[in-house]
Amino acid sequence: MSNKRTIKIDSVEPRKYVKKDGGSGQPDSIDKLSNVTLSDEQVQVKDDIIRFVKESIRNHREGDLPRVYVIKGGAGTGKSVVLNNLFNEIQKLNRKVGDEDLKGTRNYLVVNHPEMIRLYHRIARSFAYLSKRDIERPTSYINQFAKDRQKNKRLLNDLVIVDEAHLLATCKNAYKKFYGENHLTEIMKTCKVAVVVYDERQTLRTDQFWAEHSAHGCSLEDVLRQHSREHREYELQQQFRMNLSNANEDNTDVLQWVQRVCFQRHVQPVPRERLGGHFEFKVFDDCQQMYERVRSKNAQYGQCRILSTYDYPYRISGDRDWYVTGRGGFRLRWDKFTPGHTVPWSERDYTIDEVGSVYTIQGFDLNYVGVIIGPSVDIDWAADTVSVNAAAYEDRAGTVRRAGLDRDKAVETIVLNSLYVLLTRGVRGLYVYVHSEGAEPRAGERGEGNV
């Protein structure tokens, strides 16, 4: 049973932050999730979900399948903001207020993203009614529930909230101690109600491959139809991250271009170059010049970084540095794997001298971003085509073959999904460098002039 509802919003506006200390400056990732004034529509979604959760817990009977609430929306539409606010509110009602329906409930937040879970753990330290034990990686959560269930056969958690559900595993992975076939179906067996944040266009690995209306990959609709009693859906469309529109400027063509490149595989028309306005956009033929522009913006605003498609060799193990290169003498090392670091990569000062990947930055914002489009994506400006060279994609661990999945088609989707994530990180500006020789659009192939 499905109840689908879409929130459509015409305007595009930047996120408003509420600084705890009343100070100025750029908010960090905690502020961007916790100290935010929700839009009217986001408040409506949150309140509707709380009613849904209370009703689901109140009416659940032994043997019932769970009810599920799905929050959909593209990059930058505030899905995680709604989710974080929702979980905080529910745990406050549970542990502080003593709400009639929620007092004493067992509620968890699950996310399959190491940077995001560290962020949620930092947030938990700020609130007396939150605990790090409430926040788990999916495999850890599933395995711990199985152990607890052995002691109490009737055990059932009340609520599980899943952030970034498009990163959940869709196949067995004994190396990571996951022995089921699908993270989401296993999670749904543990609770009375689930809230799921999902964006099919941000699936990034073959072992976490989700694809609706396709024979390739796992379908969320199929999972919900088979494993839930009822599900409801909201789709958020308002863009909060990219500062694309205000009274004096309309830069929404930049987002339209990003979507056209990644999902329609066309590159024309290219947005006009614009420097100095509320949102900057420029295609660079010299990668070093792009990096210098990003460094200059970082000195002014902070949280400006270089990102790249996963097209340059990199290995987690060992002490060796791995480098990304480009025209103009550009040579910068990949970000280093630092599992013990609690501060997100984008907020560490030294990472201005590194190149971030999709795994580093997914779920986070930057002020200005310089994106290196590497050899896995071929752009022909004159022919208006975007094609994928899957052989050049270096994420070997993320593109392994698996039964029942057309790997070649899946990798094409993953490459373009990854590019979409990278191109939608910038709040104030997007700079692009394309690896292909002579890839910069010539005069007449893009609009000229500044805003």
Image (cartoon, grey):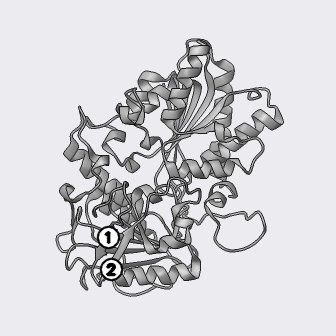
- Amino acid type at mark 1: Val
Foreground pick, 98 / 298: 298
Q: Position of residue 174 (x, y in %)?
A: 36, 31
* Residue behind mark 1: 324
Q: SS of the residue at dot 2?
A: strand
Residue displayed at 32% across by 70% down: 324
Q: Relative to residue 232, is residue 435 depicted above or below?
A: below
Residue displayed at 71% across by 27% down: 105
* Residue behind mark 2: 330
Residue displayed at 50% across by 49% down: 114
Q: Which mark is residue 128?
A: none
Q: Position of residue 175 (x, y in %)?
A: 37, 35
Q: Position of residue 146 (x, y in %)?
A: 53, 22
Could one spot residue 277 in this view of the protein? Answer: no
Query: In this image, 319 relative to 2: left or right?
Result: left
> Badges 2 and 1: C-beta atoms under 8 Å apart?
yes
Considering every residue shown, the one lying at the far front of the view is 319
Query: In this image, 314 relative to 69: left or right?
Result: left
Could one spot residue 388 in this view of the protein? Answer: yes
- Label 2 vs 1, first from the N-terminus: 1
Q: Relative to residue 428, is residue 154 depicted above or below?
A: above
Instruction: Identify the image quadrant of residue 52.
Output: top right
Q: CA distance from mark 2 to mark 1?
A: 8 Å
Instruction: Identify the image quadrant of residue 177.
Output: top left
